[in-house]
Amino acid sequence: MHRSIALLILIVGVTFSTWLRSERVTPARDKTLTFVAEPRPSEAILQAHLGPFRLEKAWEMKLGSWKFGGYSALVPLPDGRMLTLSDLGRFLVFAPPGGPKAKPWIGNLLDNPNHNKSDVDVESATRDPATGSIWLGLELRNSIIRLNSNWVQTGSVRPEIIRHWGKNSGPEAMTRLQDGRFVLLQEAPLDWWRGHRHDAVIFAGDPVEAPDAVERFVFDGPSGFDPVDMVQIPDGRVLVLMRALVWPFPQRFAARIAIADPEEIRAGGVWHAKEVARIASSLPVDNFEGIAVTPRDDGKLTVWLISDDNQAALQRTLLWKLVVDPADLPSGG
């Protein structure tokens, strides 16, 4: 009975949320990107939730007077700017506050002649720093697209091993490891109600070139949260951003950051991740779906989070800047 009631609430909430969504718009002509600082909670609240992470700043991102957003992936670029990608195949390149001064660059990353969202529903992205190639994970098609350093498509694949992941629960989290392997996590849990186990795969190399050189395993993370992005830090461990819808209308979200060691991945085994930060409603939170890491000169890491506003009237595009010392993070698993 409780599950039926919860499911009914979820359906009603999603229905109302869809009804409230703003009309999808083309990229704004006014490219004035502003960052509006969010109120910062007390140090006691931040430490209780974020553990070893320190919230340096949080902003709401606004582009002129236009509604924009829908960003589900975040990729750092070599010049200090950030590339963020939306589920409509659009991109935004921007300079975070405190970084290099540069005008934002916005447009369509993927061609969509049929105006079909399933052809451009980018939910995850990862970049090879050596070549500049970028791989995109598309959720509705459960496919992977590869772009070269000029962002020209050079290949795509629909791996057989992930075709069953579902239309709205596919490769939401993907990262290219330093050794050239690729890890993909399914958003939906294996257990229907607030599960913690998720189907996962690891490719031996570029999945576009060798889609069959792949093994399946199970990702085990914080209960009730689904993986939405992941990134490898310089010491080899992986930070996994996880998200939960805690109330459907108006939509309210919570998130977790977990850590895991990819050296512990075994074919057919369970890859355990350990929770290291809790992002709750007492913090400036929205639908966080993108995570990126940039090293600092002092050996610490800057961890960036961006939220997907779903192009909804009651949601926002938030950007967080966190700082963490890798030595303060526990071992994965």
Image: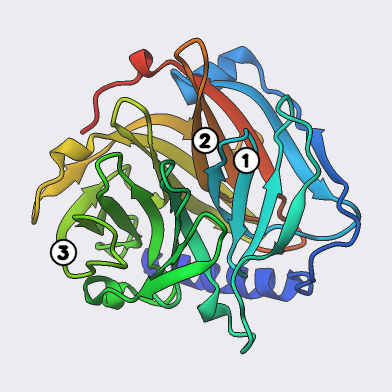
Mark 2 or mark 3: which comes first in sequence? 3
For the N terminus, the image quarter is: bottom left
Q: CA distance from mark 2 to mark 3?
A: 36 Å
Q: Which residue is depicted at the point 43% across and 15% down?
A: 325
User: Which element carries disc 2, helix, strand or loop?
Assistant: strand
Q: Which residue is mark 3?
A: 213
Q: CA distance from mark 3 to mark 1?
A: 38 Å
Q: Nearer the viewer, residue 301 or 47?
A: 301
Amino acid type, mark 3: Ala
Q: Which residue is depicted at the point 44% across and 51% down?
A: 126
- The answer to whether 271 appears left or right of 132 in the picture is left
Q: Which residue is mark 2?
A: 279
Dots 1, 2 in contact, CB < 8 A: yes
Q: Nearer the viewer, residue 147 or 117?
A: 147
Q: Whole-percent x and y of residue 41? A: 67, 22
Q: How is the image coloured?
A: rainbow
Relative to 23, residue 126 above or below = above
Marker disc for residue 285: 1
Q: Is the residue marked by circle 1 packed among few (<14), some (14-19), or many (20+) residues within 10 Å?
A: many
- The answer to whether 16 appears left or right of 110 in the picture is right
Closer to the eye: label 2 or 3: 3
Relative to 316, residue 142 above or below = below
Relative to 230, residue 49 above or below = above
Extreme residue in the bottom direction = 114
